[in-house]
Image (cartoon, helix red, strand yellow):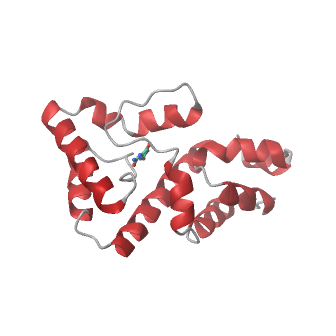
Amino acid sequence: MDLVSFNQISPEAAHAAIAHCVAIPGWQTALVAARPYATLATLYAEAERLAALWQADELEQALSAHPRIGDKVAGAGKEAALSRSEQAAMQQADGALQLAMLAGNQTYEQRFGRVFLIRAKGRSGEEMLAELQRRLNNDAESEQQEALKQLSEITLLRLKESIT
Ligand code: 2AL
C-alpha cells in the first residue's frame, strides 16, 4: 500500500493494513491515530518512536505472534508467511545447528520465561545461534531491552514492506 492510501483509508482499514507488523494493539492504534504522515520517513520515525516506549507488557503481547527460531511455522495467515520468510535461513540449516538451536531455545525459555526473539531477516542460522548463546549471559533487565530492540527491528522491517 502506498502512503497516500494509508493516510486516506478508514481507521479500521489502516489498522488492518499494519496489524501483521506487531501484535501490540496500542502501537497499531497510536500509529493510525497520528495520520496523516507527510512522508514515509515521518511514518517510519513515528513507528520507531512508539516502539521505543515498549516495556515488559508489550513484549509479552507481541510474543504470541513470533514462533521460535527453528520451529516449523504452520498457518496460512500473513504473520505466519512473514515469519517463514524471515526465518528462511533456518530451514537450510543442517541438523546439528537445528539441534543446537532447539537446545538453546529451551535453555533461554527456562532462564527468561519467554521465547527467544531475534530479528531473523539478514542473519544466518549460525549468527542467530551465536546471538542466543551470547544473550544467555545477560541479566533479566538487559535481556528485556535486547528483546525489545529486536522486536522493534522486526516491526520496522515489516512496516517498510507494507507501506511504501
Ligand atoms: C522471529 C520471527 O518470526 N521473525 C523474526 O524475525 N523473528 N521469531 C523469533 N522467535 O525471533
**Residue 163 visible to an observer of this rendering:** no
The residue at 22%/68% (across/down) is: 137
Provide residue 92's location: percent of width, then percent of height.
25, 30
Q: Residue at x 80, y 60 (%)?
A: 33
Q: Residue 134: which quarter of the image? A: bottom left
Q: Residue furthest top?
A: 76
Q: Give the percent coordinates (x, y) of residue 114.
A: 40, 55
Residue 107 visible within the image: yes
In terms of depth relative to the viewer, which is nearer, 123 or 25? 25
Q: Is residue 87 above or below residue 109?
A: above
Residue drawn at x 51%, y 60% as measured from the top left: 59
Q: Is residue 74 above or below residue 162?
A: above
Between 112 and 80, the one nearer to me in the picture: 112
Residue 7 falls left or right of residue 93:
right
- Residue 89 location, x and y as percent? 30, 37
Percent x, y for residue 3?
73, 49
Q: Is residue 1 left or right of residue 64?
A: right
In which quadrant is the N terminus drawn?
top right
**Left or right of residue 30: residue 77:** left
Residue 36, image quadrant: bottom right
Q: How many marks?
A: 0
- Residue drawn at (51%, 26%), measured in percent from left and top? 75
**In this view, 114 is above or below 145:** above
